[in-house]
């Protein structure tokens, strides 16, 4: 080493040979995800879900099976190479939130009898949801607001999509709410609601109702047992209704939005404790 006109040599030192630059590093072209639900879009996952990550990697000099792949990020990874299984972390909060995954690809090559290593990397952003909570919370919020006569129709429908199924579901529900507001006064103190199990998620699917009706072009189906008591404005007569409300939802712009609501009356529903 020479510095300031003086030279020093370290005995038994090493020689650093820089690569010539002709060998280009690996390139991570793209990364996509394949989820557990039918039709699930890339970049969407639920907390704790196992998804497959698939990367497109190219290298001009080294075959893909001789490259080294390192996946990193929160959660756990199983497998190696361009396709691995990723267990999405279950503690993401709030939801939805973006979670980043990185793939680093390393190439080893020999130049002038010296082994060199160089890497390329790519990142992938997964939008992580708690779909069950988000869908069922939105459905219960809608039915609760519907049960309060003082709440305007626009506020009742604030979680509804204006584009899902061409907006037909929201338009139909607007008519129902407007009719209810014009005809009845709700007794909110008598209102009861319970969730009828988990939502069913199937992207670009259909919800099939027990009476033969369908809710089309939706991504999730849910239902709620409800009990309503109202007074008719024209006569003051008391009317009591039990039944099940079927509420569909769609994923739009990384948010779960409601799409349809259809009610099927019944004499009673045991989970409400009311007949």
Image (spheres, helix red, strand yellow):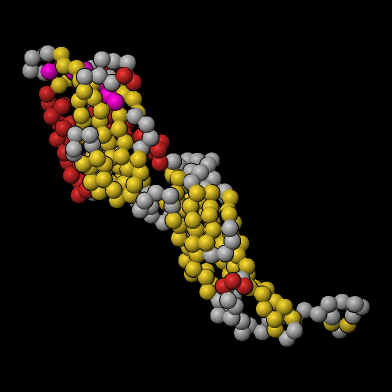
Q: Nearer the viewer, residue 85 or 74?
A: 85
* Residue at 57% over, 48% down: 75
Placement of 183 over or under 173, stated as above or below: above
Q: Is residue 223 above or below residue 107?
A: above
Q: Which residues are magenta?
A: 225-232
Numbered disc total = 0
Residue 71, x across and y down, in percent:
58, 59
- Residue found at x 31% / y 39%: 221
Most prominent secondary structure in the magenta stretch?
A: strand
Q: Is residue 144 above or below residue 5?
A: above
Q: Position of residue 127 (x, y in %)?
A: 44, 50
Is residue 3 visible in the rendered image? The answer is no
Residue at the far left in the pictured view: 234
Residue 102 percent across, percent down from the top left: 56, 59
Residue 245 drawn in magenta: no
Determine whether, in the image, residue 16 is placed left or right of residue 57: right
Placement of the N terminus among the 4 image quadrants: bottom right
Q: Residue at x 11, y 18 (%)?
A: 233
Please name the residue shown 86% across and 84% down the image: 5
Question: Is residue 197 rendered to the left or right of residue 274?
Answer: right
Vertical placement of residue 249 versus 153, above or below: below
Q: Quadrant of the C terminus?
A: top left
Residue 229, given in percent of the width and then of the height, sits at 21, 17
Confirm whether residue 177 shows in the render.
Answer: yes
């Amino acid at each position: 080493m020479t510095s300031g006109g003086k030279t020093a040599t370290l005995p038994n030192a090493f020689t650093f040979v820089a690569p010539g630059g002709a060998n280009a590093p690996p390139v991570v072209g793209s990364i996509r995800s394949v989820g557990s639900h039918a039709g699930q879009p890339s970049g969407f996952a639920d907390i704790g879900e196992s998804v497959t990550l698939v990367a497109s990697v190219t290298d001009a000099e080294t075959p893909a099976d001789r490259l080294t792949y390192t996946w990193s990020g929160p959660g756990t990874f199983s497998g190696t190479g361009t396709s691995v299984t990723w267990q999405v972390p279950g503690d993401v909060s709030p939801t939805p939130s973006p979670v980043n995954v990185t793939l680093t690809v390393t190439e080893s090559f020999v130049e002038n009898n010296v082994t060199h290593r160089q890497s390329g990397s790519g990142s992938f952003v997964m939008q992580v949801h708690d779909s069950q909570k988000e869908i069922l919370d939105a459905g219960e919020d809608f039915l609760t607001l519907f049960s309060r006569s003082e709440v305007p129709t626009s506020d009742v429908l604030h979680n509804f999509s204006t584009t899902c199924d061409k907006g037909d579901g929201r338009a139909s529900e607007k008519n129902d709410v407007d009719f209810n507001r014009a005809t009845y006064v709700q007794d909110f103190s008598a209102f009861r609601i319970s969730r009828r199990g988990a939502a069913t998620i199937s992207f670009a699917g259909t919800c099939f109702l027990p009476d033969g009706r369908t809710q089309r072009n939706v991504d999730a189906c849910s239902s709620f047992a409800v009990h309503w008591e109202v007074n008719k404005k024209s006569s003051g007569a008391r009317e009591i209704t039990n039944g099940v409300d079927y509420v569909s939802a769609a994923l739009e712009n990384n948010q779960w939005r409601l799409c349809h609501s259809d009610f099927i009356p019944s004499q009673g529903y045991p989970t409400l404790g009311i007949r």
